[in-house]
Each structure stands twice: as structure tokens, then as C-alpha cells.
Amino acid sequence: MSVVLSTPAARALPATAPRPVKDDAPFQGLLVPGLHGSDEHHWQSRWRQHMPWLHELKMEDWRQPDPALWESALERALAPLPEPAVLIAHSFGCLACAGYAARRPDRVAGLLLVAPACPEPLTLDDPSGPLPVPARVIASTTDPWMTLDDSRALARRWGAAFRNGGDLGHINTASGIGEWRQGLEDLRWLLTQRTGHA
């Protein structure tokens, strides 16, 4: 973080407009919540407090588990970014991001897929093979939305690394994990694997 020091008026430096904080971002990243979005106490919201340059997915209606709508929102969010982005997804957002990455690997540098969920009427019958970008799936032993075995099978189908996150429910606000420091370690790992960077 840069520090601005004031100078005496006689030696004042020319005023310049401050650069947006996202100009200095160490990587392009997009937070992708699940259905109903992420509240202010969710780890995704906590991460943005620490990394304010992260972008956020915008949706008109967070209640619709329609992959096409979510992938369109991802296209809009990623189009203006200067380089491929790491998608940091939770719950249903994982499925939407995986589907998008399969179609547009040129816009995705990596996927962090946390507590994937497949709400009705969707199914996990997608026959698609391994994802074309680095990915890691983190799942919980007590997730009410998807069993650990199903999450592991999904990671295997996607060709993604897999980590058993332990007894964390749906890895959300109700899990009481705060900023979820272990997840930050997963993100650091993914950043070493990502594509489209120097």
C-alpha cells in the first residue's frame, strides 16, 4: 500500500488524479456467489474487504438457478478485464463458473470452486470432460447441498484438485469461519497454477 506524504505549499507537487485501486491488483479476480448472493459476513465479502480490487458478479435476480443467465452475467463481468480472471465461486456459482470456463477458457485463468451445489431442477448429468483451466474444489463433510462423495466425483469429472474441508456445513456464514483463512491458502495455491499470467 502506498503512503502519500504532504509537502509544504512552496514545494507542492503537481496534483494528479489517484489511480483506481484495481490498477495495482496482483491478479484479476471475480467473486461469484451462489443463489441469493453472499451477505456481509460471508467469507467472500470478508475477502473483498482485504482485497478491494476484486471484482464482484452482478445479477438482476440471485434466485434463478439458470446456468445461461449466470454465464451471461459472467460474460458481462469479464469482458472489460484486461486479462483472464480467477473465478472464486461458491455453491451454485461453482456450476455456473465451470460451465462458463468450458466455453470461454480464454477469459478464465483458474477456478476456486467452494461447496458446489446443484439445486433442483438441475442435475449433475453433464457429460463434459475435464475443465480446460486449473481448478480446485473444496467440499465439506457436512454440506446439506452436496455429499462429500458427490463433490469428489464432480472434481474428478472436471479434472480439478480436491480438498476435504472438514466439518464446515455449506462453507458459508452459518459455518462461522469468518474470513476463512484456509480458503486463502487454496487461493494462493491456485494462483501458482493459473493460466494466462507472466
Image (cartoon, rainbow, N blue to C red):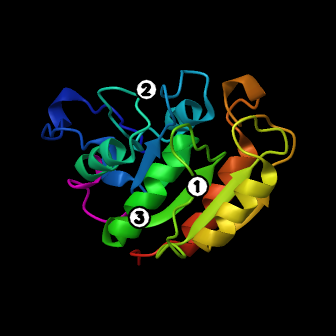
For label 1, the residue is 124
Distance of mark 2 from mark 1, alpha carbons? Answer: 19 Å
Q: Label 3 is placed on what type of residue? A: Ala
For label 3, the residue is 101
For label 2, the residue is 63
Q: Label 1 is placed on what type of residue? A: Leu
Magenta span: chief secondary structure? loop
Tell me, yes or no, if residue 27 can be seen here: no
Query: Tag 3's secondary structure?
Result: helix
Picture coordinates of residue 142, whole percent (x, y) = 83, 38
Give the mark, 1 or 3, whose residue is nearer the N terminus.
3
**Residue drawn at (53%, 50%), measured in percent from left and top?**
94
Crowding at mark 2 (Cα within 10 Å: few <14, some 14-19, many 20+):
few
Distance of mark 2 from mark 3, alpha carbons? Answer: 22 Å
Crowding at mark 1 (Cα within 10 Å: few <14, some 14-19, many 20+):
few
**Circles 2, 3 touching at the beta carbon (< 8 Å):** no
**Residue drawn at (61%, 28%), measured in percent from left and top?**
42
